[in-house]
Amino acid sequence: MASGVEQIVSEITEIMDQYRREVPSGRRAWPESIKSRVLSLRRAGVRCAEISRRTGLPYYTVLEWRRGQSGFVELPVVVEAKKVSTVTVPTLGTITVVLPSGVRIEGMCVEVLKAILPSLGRGQ
């Protein structure tokens, strides 16, 4: 098995040398031929740090390939509905407040409402 690992490492370094000569940019996508050989080394039980050290590939690139990710990770987007409090002021001088949770506070004057709203996390 060791000779097979040595052969794969040798192939990777040869492909990398050629690739770096032909594609001289700093950030580039690695060829599938390198990636598939790295995954073969992983299946053979070679640790990511060892693969990186022996081939010259960046350690974190080898880690990404190990997880099967080679780019962006898709994350779900959750949009929370806007929560709104409803305040009703009748002509009699008392106020009714309906909080987003559905709690209804009725029959209080403005002074009491000013006192309790900060403790509810709304208004100041």
Image: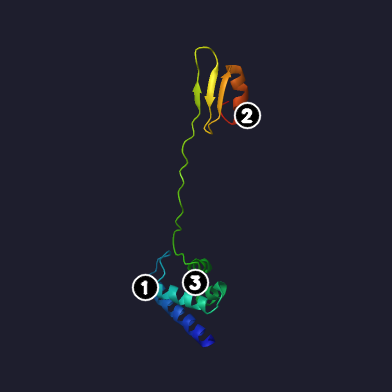
Q: Nearer the viewer, residue 113 or 73?
A: 113
Q: Earlier in the sequence, mark 1 or mark 3?
A: 1
> Helix, strand or loop at disc 3?
loop
Residue 89 locus on image (x, y percent): 50, 18
CA gap, disc 1 and disc 2: 66 Å
> Helix, strand or loop at disc 2?
helix
Q: Residue furthest top?
A: 92
Residue 33 locus on image (x, y percent): 40, 75
Q: Residue furthest left?
A: 22
Q: Amino acid at mark 2?
A: Ser
CA gap, disc 1 and disc 3: 17 Å
In the picture of the structure, the residue carrying the numbered disc 2 is 119
Q: Residue at horizontal 43%, vertical 80%?
A: 14
Say few, some or many: other residues with alpha carbon within 10 Å of mark 2 (under 14 / 14 to 19 / 20 or more): few
Residue 112 locus on image (x, y percent): 62, 19
Q: Residue at horizontal 53%, vertical 77%?
A: 54
Residue 53 locus on image (x, y percent): 55, 75
- In the rendered image, the vertical position of residue 111 relative to residue 80, given as above or below: above
In the picture of the structure, the residue carrying the numbered disc 3 is 57
Q: Amino acid at mark 3?
A: Leu
Q: Residue at horizontal 52%, vertical 67%?
A: 63
- In the rendered image, the vertical position of residue 35 relative to residue 3, given as above or below: above
In the picture of the structure, the residue carrying the numbered disc 1 is 22
User: Which label sits in the foreground, 1 or 3?
Assistant: 3
Q: Amino acid at mark 1?
A: Glu
User: Which label sits in the foreground, 1 or 2?
Assistant: 2
Q: Earlier in the sequence, mark 1 or mark 2?
A: 1
Q: Nearer the viewer, residue 22 or 52?
A: 52
- In the rendered image, the vertical position of residue 39 relative to residue 122, given as above or below: below
